[in-house]
């Protein structure tokens, strides 16, 4: 799974780097739009390693992905004025910073340690 932080999209690519499925937040992107955005150049294979793409290769990143998808939805539905002036890229960067801060200062670990039966199945 790859996150396109510039567009607020989530991409599932195959081994040939062809985008098979794409979502904007939680909404599926049509085949036509997906092909227009990610498969425009027949002879050039996108690498998805540029700055605007994040490879989701660990389960720890699911938190980031879910929070980002929620915020993309909120931004698109004009639910919060504070999101109107932000780009998707800024929103993703802030999500990363907040998640890192929660892990760094022990807030999550301390809470789970106090009440493990609530969080561990």
Image: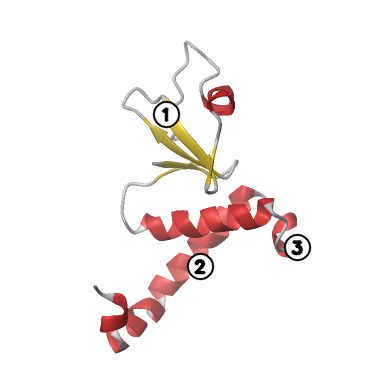
| Numbered mark located on residue 93 in the image | none
Q: Quadrant of the N terminus?
A: top left
Vertical placement of 90 versus 117: above or below? above
The mark lying in front, picked from 1 and 3, is 1
Could you give the CA–CA distance between mark 1 and mark 3, rounded to whole angstroms? 33 Å
User: Where's residue 41, x and y in %?
Assistant: 53, 15
How far apart marks 3 and 2 lie (CA) works out to 20 Å
* Mark 3, other Cα within 10 Å: few <14 / some 14–19 / many ≥20: few
Instruction: Please report contact status of discs 1 and 3: CB closer than 8 Å, yes or no.
Output: no
Front: mark 1 or 2: 1
Query: Viewer-proximal residue, 10 or 31?
Result: 31
* Discs 3/2, front: 3
Q: Nearer the viewer, residue 91 or 29?
A: 29
Mark 1 / mark 3, whichever is N-terminal: 1
Direction top: furthest residue = 43
Which residue position is annotated with label 3?
81
Query: Circle 2 sits in a helix, a strand or a loop, which is it?
Result: helix
Q: Which residue is mark 2?
A: 98
- Residue 118 locus on image (x, y percent): 31, 81
Of the numbered discs 1 and 2, the one sitting upstream in the chain is 1
Q: Does residue 52 appear anywhere in the picture?
A: no
Element type at mark 1: strand
In the rendered image, the quadrant that contains the C terminus is: bottom left
Q: How many numbered callouts?
A: 3
Residue at 51% from the left image edge and 21% from the top image edge: 39
- Label 1, on which residue? 20
Q: Residue at x 71, y 63 (%)?
A: 80
In percent of the image, x 31 and y 76: which residue is there?
119
Identify the residue shown where x is 55% and y is 18%: 40
Q: Is residue 61 shown to the viewer in this render?
A: yes
Q: Closer to the camera, 64 or 27?
A: 27
Q: Earlier in the sequence, mark 3 or mark 2?
A: 3
């Amino acid at each position: 799974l790859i996150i396109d932080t510039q567009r607020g999209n989530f991409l599932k690519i195959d081994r040939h780097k062809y985008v098979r499925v794409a979502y904007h937040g939680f909404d599926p992107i049509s085949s036509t739009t997906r092909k227009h955005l990610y498969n425009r150049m027949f002879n050039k294979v996108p690498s998805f390693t540029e700055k605007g793409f994040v490879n989701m290769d660990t389960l720890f990143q699911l938190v980031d992905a879910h929070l980002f998808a929620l915020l993309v939805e909120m931004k698109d539905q004009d639910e919060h004025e504070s999101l109107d002036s932000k780009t998707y890229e800024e929103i993703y960067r802030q999500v990363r910073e907040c998640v890192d801060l929660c892990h760094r200062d022990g807030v999550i670990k301390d809470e789970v340690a106090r009440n493990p039966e609530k969080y561990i199945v």
